[in-house]
Amino acid sequence: MLLFTPGPTPTPESIRQSMATPTLHHRTPEFESIFAQARLGLKVMLGMPEVLMLASSGTGAMEAALTQLCKSKLLSISCGKFGQRWGKIAQAHAIPHTEIAREWDTPVSAQEILEALRADESIDTIALQVCESAGGLRLDVESIAREAKALNRDIIIIADAITAMGVEPIDTTHIDALIGGSQKACMLPPGMSIIGLSQMALGRIERSAPWRAGLYFSFAQELKNQRKNTTAWTAPTTLIIGLVRYFEIIQALADSPLESALLTPSAPLDEKRLEQGFQAAYAHTKALALATREALAALSLSLYPKSPALAMSAIAHAESASIRKAMKGFGVNVAAGQDHIKDSIFRINHMGLIQAYEASFVINALELSLAKLNLRSFDGRGGAVFLRAFYGIEKGA
Ligand SMILES: *Cc1c(COP(=O)(O)O)cnc(C)c1O
């Protein structure tokens, strides 16, 4: 079965192999050098001055960032299930909180956020998603962060980039905490979260006593350790080894096609090549997502969100549940929606390094399913449109 859900994503063979070595002790020079490589890779991927790895799923990092960076009042942006989570975290920790909520296909604009900031000067933190996975929606986080800082230079911006990190370039200039998780574009098993921190966030962490950090998620404690290539508590060693392998593959994309990059021999990370590799990975993901969308349009299917992210394509369709079930019969697993849009959308993943032969078969399986359900007669059009778009084959050629 092809796993095409927007997280978890499949783990490539060579990453699985890298993690199959005997368990290393985390307090050894051998693991410290692996940890240093992981830190280097993360700094290149996030473009931020400091990074942390925590043994938790993504939500753990969301909670850690919120409890440690928000001092007086949180403004959370909710355009879906993950945006709602900020409010739940604030409630759990009794953090004063206000929310701007929208239907899950609709992004919140910078203008609306500025109005909320002007109306309540006690707001010192904004938390939002780069890509809201509930509806595959991209928020213009970069502009929101820039404009919010122009209004109040001390405001903290926490961005959940769990389905954007490693998918597309994110301008982190005005973002203070950028959150990721192992199981999305990094193609690792679940269990590790990633946090990028700005100078301003570092200042808040280092100058102040941690407000509500607790013990386990203390950024101050982790910073002290991780800057020395170790962790406060037992590190998720296996996942960190896998992360370094992911960076090796990305780096190899700088000068090799995907097929051979996946098999590249282990090599020390080089910042320049890694940057070039990420550009290639982003271009690949974008090409796959755009070719998929051309094919969807050719099958008369439309996207659910008003501003679609590149991480996934969420398709609005009244027969979503039957389509998903039929696709499983053709060996493809795509995701349903959640909550009130559970059966009115289905979501095709584009995160991770997906081969064109897999992505094109997803379109074939979708077209076959539409035919099986008597929604459209089969003519192979979806596959043809996908391949023409992805490989740039002109009409008539
Ligand atoms: C997957 C995901 C999360 C993380 O959820 P966990 O289950 O805690 O890993 C958070 N935000 C978004 C937008 C996601 O897609």
Image (tube, grey):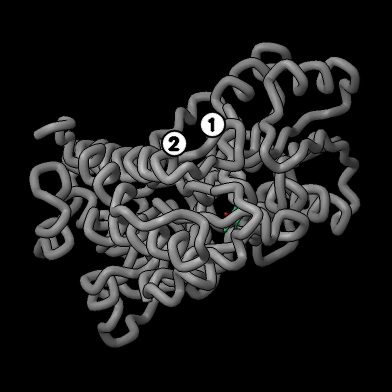
Residue 213 location (% of width, % of height): 73, 56
Packing grade of label 2 (10 A; few <14, some 14-19, many >=20) is few
Disc number for residue 70: none
Q: Amino acid at mark 2?
A: Pro
Task: Tell me: is circle 1 under 8 Å from ligand 1.
Answer: no
Disc 1 on helix, strand or loop? helix
Which residue is at a point 36% across and 43% down the rendered structure image?
A: 295
Please report whichever mark, 1 or 2, sits nearer to the chain's N-terminal start: 2
Which residue is at a point 74% across and 37% down the rendered structure image?
A: 77
Residue 30 location (% of width, % of height): 26, 71
Of residues 177 and 159, the one drawn nearer to the viewer in this rendering: 159
Q: Is residue 138 above or below residue 269?
A: above
Disc 2 on helix, strand or loop? loop
Residue 282 location (% of width, % of height): 31, 40
Residue 146, picture quadrant: top right
Which residue is at a point 65% across and 42% down the rendered structure image?
A: 205
Q: CA distance from mark 1 to mark 2?
A: 7 Å
Q: Which residue is mark 1?
A: 199
| Figure quarter occupied by ligand 1 | bottom right
Q: Is residue 370 visible?
A: yes
Residue 54 location (% of width, % of height): 53, 62
Of residues 308 and 378, the one drawn nearer to the viewer in this rendering: 378
Q: Which residue is mark 2?
A: 49
Which residue is at a point 61% across and 32% down the rendered structure image?
A: 306
Q: Is residue 78 left or right of residue 289?
A: right
1 and 2 marks in contact (CB < 8 Å) = yes
